[in-house]
Image (tube, grey):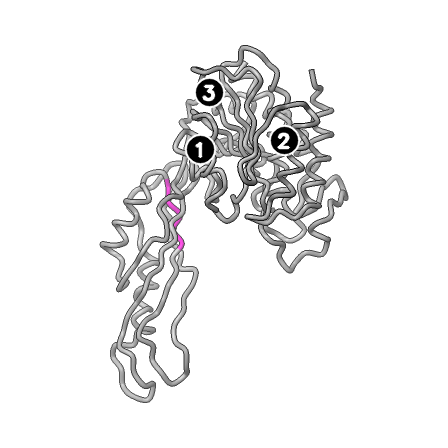
Amino acid sequence: MIKQKELSKKAIALLKNLIETPSFSCEEDKTAALIENWFLDFEIPFKRTKHNVWAVNKHFTEGKPTLLLNSHHDTVKPNKGYTKDPFKAIVQDEKLYGLGSNDAGGCLVSLIATFTYFYTKKNLKYNLVLVASAEEENSGSNGLNSMLKVIPEIDVAIVGEPTLMNLAVAEKGLIVFDATVKGTPSHAAHINNDNAIYNTVDVLKWFQEYKFEKKSPVLGDVKMTVTQINAGKQHNAVPAEVNLVVDVRVNDKYSNQEIEKILNKKSPCTTIEARSLRLNSSSIPINHPLVEAGIELGRQTYGSPTLSDQACLSCPSLKLGPGDSTRSHTADEFIYLNEIEEGIQIYIELLNKVVT
């Protein structure tokens, strides 16, 4: 049997290699190769679909429920605030610095190590499927969503994102709307009582003040935020319309389709159109064995406001991983080395309670 300490050591080594290998969304071919090497080293059969690498446990048995272990190996691009080389794995004060260390490299290597620990075990109550996925950061078409017709059908999932190893039992969905506020175009020198920019003032106030009726005990209110506004091309011409982008974070009391209908009916925009309705909210029952096992291990439950690959899953899913979400996408991103060690330990203890 592979010892947990040895797995932790190798997982950290893999993470260092991942950090030093750029893997922006849609450009993950080289990090996929690094993950393939892990499976080759441990003699675990695997498959690769585009830049997604996946495997099933040795004693996969038809008819058993299947548990997905998933995290992603793509990253955002580094911001201009970095003072350290984002593509160099630097260990300092027990922190491992580097782009993707926290989001979500620490989660990924911890889940890969956990899958490896359970790979040869017999008589598990659940089949295990590990997917190291691509294109999470850009919600791309060739990420986990594309794998759901490739891998065995799954019944429940653990999605590795930084949660300080607490249990995110629900996650808000996302809809991005493009909206317009129209008016009458004119020369700026003439009186115009239908100025599209002035018309937008009341529209912005409506988005700021509107409250959806249903509040979630875990995720709170639906949150609407106007994040972009664009109008006009020259100083002496009143534009015909103002274009808005509205970011809506959806709780588990509404479907994305319901939110779309409400805004189409009630918003004071001239037009409003959703870019996509596929990024739904997600959750897992508080009495699910995975959640109960996590609570027994002393982990806290909460609702997550950030989006992950849970959005493309229709089965119950739990977001859980080492690292801290507040470090994600920040300059000089890092994860504590002991967070990875603890993450592997808690993942193993959790699955021991549920699958063995």
Does the magenta-highlighted stretch encompass residue 295? no
What amino acid is at disc 3?
Pro
Q: Is residue 100 left or right of residue 317?
A: right
- Residue 289 numbered mark, or none: 3
Q: Which residue is mark 2?
A: 110
Q: Residue at x 33, y 44 (%)?
A: 256
Rendered image: mark on residue 2 = none
Q: What residue sits 40% from the left and 29% below the top? A: 315
Going from the N terminus, do you reach mark 1 or mark 2 first? 2
Name which of mark 2 and mark 3 comes first in the sequence.
2
97 to 205, vertically: above or below: above
* Magenta-tinted stretch: 247-251
Give left or right: position of 204 versus 266: right
Instruction: Name the image quarter holding residue 288.
Output: top left
Quadrant of the snapshot with the N terminus: top right
Residue picked out by circle 1:
148
Task: Estimate the spatial distance between the alpha carbons at disc 3 and disc 1, rounded to whole Å.
Answer: 23 Å
**Which of the two discs, 3 and 1, sits closer to the camera?**
1
The x and y percentages for residue 23 are 62, 47
Spatial CA distance of label 2 from label 3 is 21 Å
Q: Amino acid at mark 2?
A: Ser
Q: 168 above or below 240?
A: above
Label the magenta part by its dominant secondary structure.
Answer: strand
Q: CA distance from mark 1 to mark 2?
A: 22 Å
The crowding category of the residue bearing disc 2, from other C-alpha atoms within 10 Å (few below 14, some 14 to 19, many at least 20), is many
